[in-house]
Every structure is written in structure tokens, then in C-alpha cells.
Image: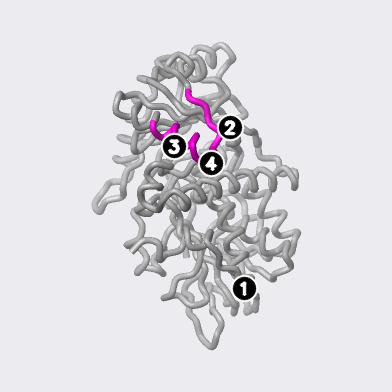
Amino acid sequence: MSRNGTDLRHGRSVWLADAPQSRPARTYPLFRGRRVSDVVIVGGGITGALVALTFAREGIPVILLEADCVGCGSTAASSALLLQEPDRGLADLTGRYGRAASRRIWELGREGVRDLVRTLHRHRIACDLVERDAIYYATTPRAFHRLRAEFHLRSRAGFACEWLTAGAVRRATGVSARGAIRTTGNAQFDPYKACLGLMRIAASAGAAIYERSPVTHIHHANGLVRIHTRHGGIDASRVVIATGYATRHFRPLAGRFRMYRTYVLATRPLTDRQRRDVGLGNIMVWDTDRPYHYARWTSEHRLLLGGADRPIRPGQTRSRVFTAATRELRADFERLLPALAEIEIEAAWEGLFALTPDSLPYVGPHRNYPGHLFALGYGGNGMTFGSLAARLLLEHWRGEHGADHRLFHFSRLR
């Protein structure tokens, strides 16, 4: 149903560094035979794991099907910045949806981070989870004025944030910027370890997990959704499509997304002196550029550098684009943090993601697909919105269809 993990990412992610190959050993069995279940989840990334856990701990029979190995697609390509802010600022969303709706979207982003952090702590999942402040900075006069206005709008809406002067940004990050917004309540982790841990807890709660079990087709008949794999099939009341984007089985939905590739560089582990020379403190940073650049430290004291997003276009040579993008990304960060010029980049990789016109996901049903629920199009906030999607989909299963659901419904964009 989804591309395999090596199509969803390219290059060698540091999260898979301990695996003997690019395809880690299978943890869960292949799906075979015929089954009946209340819910089937298609997609074994972190969203699929969260949905499986959320449903299973409510006693709902659930089966999860992953085409490759769990956590090895877009999840393994992520740099796992758990930012509360959506990709679109509060000002942009207010202009599109009004003050009340935009504020609620932001509140839900905060809740998504908080709920995911709580879940990881509650189940004692070892994934290098730490809470971090985030600094969102501007380097040009125009971006500075827009960011300053964004800060005032956030403050008036009641979102805790702090304005940083150029000097304060420099001291905290080593970056020469004109100003920045600092927020608390964000987090970071190892996304692959987190996904494996969540999947393990979901399985212990009763979810049946299957790997290397791609879905060949789905159809709706006699009030049931029939999900077919190479070696069997399942009849279910609902199927949740948690593949991140509209796969070839849902071509009519493809026009709602634009597909991008994003790029990440990882340094080798740095000494304390090298970290001081770089100047970036224990904080996550991202800028106002579009596409934006972001950076953070790992638990091994590697520096992750991300960005240089590019839309996918027909006729592109993937390896050539990868080389150009990673070279550009390194050059951009060397301008911001000159000490990086002397530091070795040990790993580089690329991930695939889907972006909607308003940078918000689609979560819920679609009228053309009876029995289906979707969780797609996260942009750069997959971890945050994946946590939110799990809650919204459970509510939908229960028959709850409130204002929060309308914010992420397919019908919001015509």
C-alpha cells in the first residue's frame, strides 16, 4: 500500500546506524490467511503505532499492516523535532480560518506534543526523549518585521513565548539573526526507537502487528472494508490509512498534496570544545525561510542539520538532486555557523513527505471512500500531528464529530 522504506528515504539515517543493513531484521510476522477485525491500520510508522496503541488500549480489535519493516520509512528519515507550532504561523492561519479556529489549531499542536511526551514517559520507552526550548529566528529585515508581528499575535492569543534580541539569539545559538521567538514545551527523540517502543506496547495491549505485508487493494462491500494482501485478507469495519500521503491506491486524492523531499545531515559526535566552537546550545532552532532550515543535537552530541526541501518533479534524477541538496544544505549552515566548515559530516539522508495547501493534515473520513479513515499530509509536523490524529480517529470511531474534527477534515479545502 505504501512504498517500501528505501523509497520513503534515501541515504543512511543515523537512527538505523545500529541495524546491520538498511532493512533491519523483521520483528513481526507476515500476514497470512483470512481474518476479521474491527479496525485495520495500513502503515507502520509512528502514526500507525500511535493509532494502534490508542485503539488497542480501549479494547478495540485492531490489526496493523506494514509493507516493509516498522519504523523504517518516513519515521526513520525524520529528525524528530517535536515542535508545537504548525508549519504555518498563527498570522497565516488567522488570515485563512479566523482567530478562533487558528488559535484552536495551535492549541491542538501543543496538546499533540504534550500527549506524545506523556505516552513515551508513561510506558518508559527508551528513545532519548528530552524536552527542549525552540528558537524561531529571522535573518532579513522583512522577515524580522513579520516575525515581530507574529510574536505579538501569539502573545495576545495567550501562547507563552519570549522575544529575543539579536544578541540573545547569538548567545543561545551562535547564529547571527535580527530577532527570534523562543518557546518552551517542545521535545526531541530518536524516532525509530520511539516507533519500535510504541509498536511493542500496542502489541502488548492486543494489537496484531504484521511486517512485510503490503496491501494490494481495498474495497468496500456489504458494509465491510475488505483489505487484501499478497497472502490473505481481512474484513473490517474500518480501515485507517496512515501512510503519510496518498498512495497509488488513492490516486483521486493525490491532487490534494504536493510531494517533497527533505534532507538531513548528521555530523560525527563532537567534543565539548567543538560544540562550544559551533555555538549552538541545547536548543532546537529553525528559521523563517521557506523552505526552512532547522538544527538540533542528538544524545550522542551529533549535530543534525535539516532543510533544503524540494518538490518532486517528473524527470528528476534522484541521486543528482540528493547531491545538490545536501551540498546546498551544508553551505547554508556553514554560513550560519562557520565552525561547521571544519567538522566532518558522517551521514546524509533524504525523506519523502506530503504537504497540503495550508500545511495542515487531513484526518478523518472522505465521502468517496466508505469505511475509510485517513491520517495524511503532515508536512514537517508528522510526529506532533500523528499523536493528534490518533485521538481524533478514536473519537470518530466512537461517533464523536466535533469542531476539532472539522479543522482537519477534507472538506475544509475546496
- Quote the CA–CA distance across marks 2 and 1: 47 Å
Examine the rendered structure and indicate whether residue 397 appears above or below residue 358.
Answer: below
Of mark 1 and mark 3, the one earlier in the sequence is 1
Of mark 1 and mark 4, the one earlier in the sequence is 1
**Can residue 184 be seen in the rendering of this structure?**
yes
Left of 331 or right of it: where is 216?
right
Question: Where does residue 305 sit, x and y in percent of width and height?
Answer: 45, 30
Pair 1/3: label in front: 3
Specify the quadrant of the image occupied by residue 212. bottom right
- Quote the CA–CA distance across marks 3 and 4: 16 Å
Circle 1: residue type: Arg
Q: Are marks 2 and 1 in contact (CB under 8 Å)?
A: no
Question: Dot 3 corresponds to which residue?
Answer: 153
At label 2, counting other C-alpha atoms closer than 10 Å, the crowd grade (few under 14, some 14-19, many 20 or more) is some
Q: Of the numbered discs in the image, which one, if any, rests on residue 184? A: 2
Of mark 3 and mark 2, the one earlier in the sequence is 3
Q: Of the numbered discs in the image, which one, if any, rests on residue 32? A: 1
Of mark 2 and mark 1, the one earlier in the sequence is 1
Question: Where does residue 174 sit, x and y in percent of width and height?
Answer: 46, 16
Of mark 3 and mark 4, the one earlier in the sequence is 4
**Can residue 305 be seen in the rendering of this structure?**
no
Circle 3: residue type: Leu
Label 1, secondary structure: give it: loop
- Quote the CA–CA distance across marks 1 and 4: 40 Å
Pair 3/4: label in front: 3
Q: What span is colored magenta in the figure?
A: 149-163
- Quote the CA–CA distance across marks 4 and 2: 9 Å
Residue ID at (55%, 64%): 402
Q: Of the numbered discs in the image, which one, if any, rests on residue 84? A: 4
